[in-house]
Amino acid sequence: MIDSGNINYLQLDYSVAHGSINANRVMNQKTGNQIIIEELDREFIFVFALSALSRYRVNDWDKIISGKSSNLISKIRRYLQTVQLLFPNFILNELYGRILSFYSPARAGSLGD
């Protein structure tokens, strides 16, 4: 297993909230114009593209996950880890129409007692 280090949820949440993650711009191939997409859409498109790649380009997918040709798999895993942290919040924000942040609950008392 590849470990790309810890992902700090607070730092990720801050980056998204303050627009310092600018990967939500895509290029329209026909017009050359940039299109801004929402983070939820970007995450869905990414996961859809991975599933299509793994289903229809099996040999290419095998090379990617084996890490033989590049370190792309570590970047994919890192991105999927961030999606796992942020996606539930994005869904709740859309459902409630406002920005909600949820953090791991604090522990009360000691675990040994």
Image (cartoon, grey):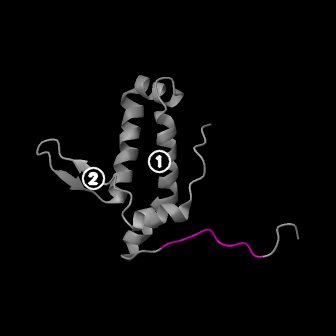
Q: Residue furthest right?
A: 113
Residue in the picture at 73% in, 72% down: 107
Q: Residue furthest left?
A: 31
Q: Magenta residues: mostly which secondary structure?
A: loop
Looking at the rendered structure, the secondary structure element under dot 2 is strand
Q: On the rendered structure, is 31 left or right of 8?
A: left
Question: What whole-number distance in Å separates the C-alpha atoms at marks 1 and 2?
Answer: 16 Å
Residue 63 percent location from the top left of the image: 47, 25
Where's the N terminus, which quadrant? top right
Tag 1: residue type? Tyr
Q: Residue at x 38, y 57 (%)?
A: 21
Residue 57 percent across, percent down from the top left: 37, 27
Amino acid at pointer 2: Arg
Whether 51 is drawn above or below 11: the answer is above
Q: How many marks?
A: 2
Neighbourhood count class around disc 1 (C-alpha, 10 Å): few under 14, some 14–19, many 20 upward = few
The region drawn magenta spans 101-108
Label at residue 79: 1
Residue 27 vs residue 2: left or right?
A: left
